[in-house]
Image (cartoon, helix red, strand yellow):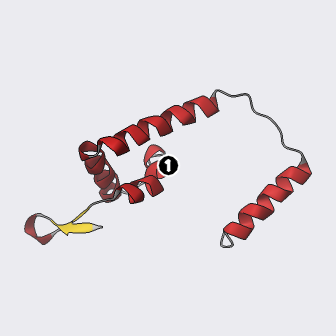
Amino acid sequence: MGTEGKAGSVVKRFTCGELVEVVTAYLDDALDEPDRAAVESHLARCADCGLYLDQFRATVRAVADQPGEQLSQPVRDRLMAAFKARHPSS
């Protein structure tokens, strides 16, 4: 994920797949500066990922505009159990 830059410094580079993995953190401003710079560099040269980011933002806005619903406790319990089964360290 890195290439040699000026004066031997390592400059991060993201692939399209890696960008997809960090897009939420990017939008939440939760990336460190090297990762943020790598995402922005990738977006500057990859039209497909720029389109993906635009679509992701539009989806977030559309979902945010929907009225919230409360899940029943049994449904919440099943969802949490399924999540914990897929992500045991969470």
Occupied quadrant, residue 12: bottom left
Which residue is outermost to the left?
7
Residue 17 falls left or right of residue 38: right
Left or right: where 33 falls relative to 5: right
Does residue 25 appear left or right of residue 4 in this picture?
right
Residue placed at 90% from the left, 50% from the top? Answer: 73
The three-letter amino acid code for the residue at tag 1 is: Thr
Picture residue at 69% right of the left edge, 28% below the top: 66
> Who's the residue at 46% across and 44% down the image?
27
Q: Seen from this angle, which residue lies furthest front?
A: 48
Q: In the rendered image, which quarter is residue 34 located in?
A: bottom left
Task: Judge whether 1 appears above or below 74 on screen.
Answer: below
Question: Which quadrant is the N terminus positioned in?
Answer: bottom left
Give the residue number, with chain letter if any, for mark 1: 24
Q: Nearer the viewer, residue 42 or 9?
A: 42
> How many numbered callouts?
1
Measuring from the top left, give residue 84's x and y in whole percent.
73, 66
The image shows residue 53 at horizontal and vertical percentages of: 42, 41
Q: Where is residue 28 shown, x and y percent of the image? A: 49, 45
Q: Can residue 37 be seen in this view?
A: yes
Q: Residues within 10 Å of mark 1 (few under 14, many from 20)?
A: some
Q: Residue 89: name its quadrant.
A: bottom right
Asked whether the viewer can see residue 30, the reply is no
* Secondary structure state at the residue bearing disc 1: helix
Q: Residue at x 76, y 62 (%)?
A: 82
Quadrant in which the C terminus appears: bottom right
